[in-house]
Every structure is written in C-alpha cells, then in structure tokens.
Amino acid sequence: MARYPDYVPHGVIPAALLAFDEDYAIAEAETRRHFSYLGDVAGITAVTVNGHSSEVHACSFDEQTRILGIAGETIGDRLPLINGIYADGSLEAARLARMAETGGASALLCFPPHSMRMGGIRYRPEMALTHFKIIADATDLPLIVFQYGDELAYSLDTLIDIAEQIPTVRAVKDWSSAQDHERHIKVLQNLSRPINVLSTNSAWLMSSLVMGANGLLSGAGSVIADWQVALFNAIQSDELNIAKTVADRIWYTSQVFYCDPFGDMHNRMKEALVLLGRQKRAIVRPPLVKLSMAEIARIAVALGKAGLEPEGTAHN
C-alpha cells in the first residue's frame, strides 16, 4: 500500500540512477547510498525509480520489484516514491502497476508504449486511452503521463481526453518543445480538474519553469537536485535574479549531460557522480557502453566550472 495515499505529483522530483557491479548485477549498497543522498536533499517532494535514468529498459520485472523495494527500505519512510511503468504491452503495464502499488509506490510514471509508434498515437488515440484505462483498472495510485517530444507524443486533445476520462491521472511529465510545453501548462493546469505539468526539459529548465510548470521530474536531479530546488523555489517566489544565478550554474551541467548522443545523458550523470565521490563506479548495461576518457574529462571540467566539488573537499 502507498505510504502517502493523498500524494499529488508536484514540486522537484529527482529521477534516481541505478548502480551496477562489474558483472552488471544491481549494486545494492551503492544504490542505497544514492537513494540516501537524494533523500537528504531538502525541498524535494518525491523520488522516481524504475525510470529512464535507472535504465529500466534493461531491467527485468523481478529487478524492478527489487529496485522499488530497496528505495522503500532506504527512503520510503521519508518521501513518496514514484515508480516507472515501462512496457510495450498494456497487460504487462498493469502487472507492473499492481507490483508497484503492493511495493509501496505513491504514484506511477507511465511511459508511452513503443508499440504505439508508426502512427498509432497520431491516428488511433483510442490506443492511448485504452492503455491508461487498463493501468487505472489495475491500481488506485495517481498516474503521471509521460509526454514525449517525438512520434510518441500525445496530442493535446488526447491528453485532455485521458485527463477527463481517467480520474487517477494527476500529472504530465512534459518533454515537449517550448511552444507545446507552454500550451500544455496553460491548458492542463486550468482544467476543471487541474493536471500538474512537471517539466522534464532539463536542457532549458529555467525557461520551462518560468512558463508556470507546477514541478519538474528530471534525471539531472540525481546530480543537482539541490540546485533544482533552489531554481524552482526562486521562480515560485518571483525572485528571478536568484533564479538566473542558479540557472547559470546549472547551464554548465546541462551542456555536458544533454549533448549528442542524447541517449548517453544518464551515462554522463553516472560519471558525474563518480567524479563527485558519490558513487564508486559508473557502469551501464549494454547496449549502453562506457564513455571515452575525453568525454569524462569534459564532464569534470564542466562540474568544476559549475562549482561542484567532490564530497569532503576541504576549503582553506
């Protein structure tokens, strides 16, 4: 059962990374260490597990169950946990949803099935509605719609239909382009039953939050959750000078995390945690591969320019 039954997704929500051993098994001690670090960040409202940032695509059902369990044992008594629902079939998504509710999650982040590519979302929006209805029938937990920015993006009309027909949908994690993102904020957050928009546009986060998003859900929060809290709070308080100062520091990290190839973003964040002394190893599961030493060096330079230093660094 959910430890936070009245939880509504909002505010600053880091998406946790997942530590692996040399043999690609889950490194439980290092994963707990990472969860503990995130749980100690003042001002976050929840932590997401089993998302893109934890390489959910490469994790089995049993592993996802264990990851949620580790998170619950480590920080579940302090913060709501959001569990990713990543499946190409709606029945498997429902199975994951039941597992997450039993495992203590307080909300579900629902990825769009890749089976809806090739025109499915655009020309058959009833596929999306069916998918969410099947998940909603399996659990009473609040649902977060993951809105992609590519061919798996739902139209605004479809998002409205999902929100109106499925009462447990409470938020949208929005990865849309700027114009669509602003439109989603203006429309969805002003429905008769408002739907919170959570930005995941971490490469241009300040601009996104100034548009009025009621929160953010970001893998970069695994590294800079405290800065994300500072930025979000400054914008909420209309202290744009403070927000700009924080955003100027975040800029250095976003430049190295969100460059091409985009799929290596969380790979880079793992290397950042190693450079900062927060993790022992930066191991990713294939087909992801280790970054080059040159790229790791660029990340180190960016962290230095941003003012991020290894844990325990002394100042004279």
Image: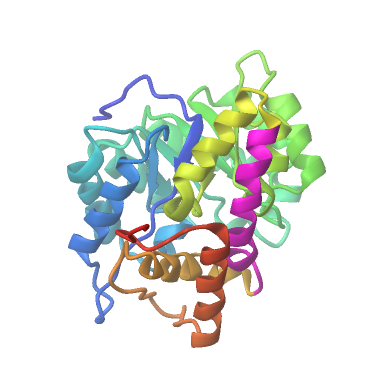
Q: Quadrant of the C terminus?
A: bottom left
Which residue corresponds to the image point at 52% horizontal and 80% vertical from the top-left?
297
Q: Nearer the viewer, residue 270 or 231?
A: 231
Q: Nearer the viewer, residue 142 or 122?
A: 142
Colour scheme of the rendered structure: rainbow
Q: Position of residue 202 (x, y in %)?
A: 61, 51
Q: Picture quarter containing residue 98?
A: top left
Q: Quadrant of the N terminus?
A: top left
Q: Is residue 132 visible?
A: no
Q: Is residue 273 visible?
A: yes
The stretch drawn in magenta includes residue 251: yes
Q: Is residue 5 left or right of residue 228?
A: left
Which residue corresponds to the image point at 45% horizontal and 43% vertical from the top-left?
226
Magenta stretch, main secondary structure class: helix
Which residue corresponds to the image point at 36% horizontal and 32% vertical from the top-left?
139
Residue farthest along the front direction in this orientation:
316
Residue farthest along the top direction in this orientation:
192
Q: Position of residue 122 (x, y in %)?
A: 75, 49
Q: Position of residue 196 (x, y in %)?
A: 59, 27
Label count reads 0
Q: Position of residue 84 (x, y in %)?
A: 42, 48
Q: Nearer the viewer, residue 297 or 74?
A: 297
Q: Nearer the viewer, residue 212 or 106?
A: 212
Q: Picture quarter containing residue 280?
A: bottom left
Q: Is residue 273 left or right of residue 212?
A: left
The stretch drawn in magenta includes residue 123: no
From this view, report whether residue 263 is shown above or below residue 216. below
| Magenta residues (range) | 241-260
Residue farthest along the bottom direction in this orientation:
293
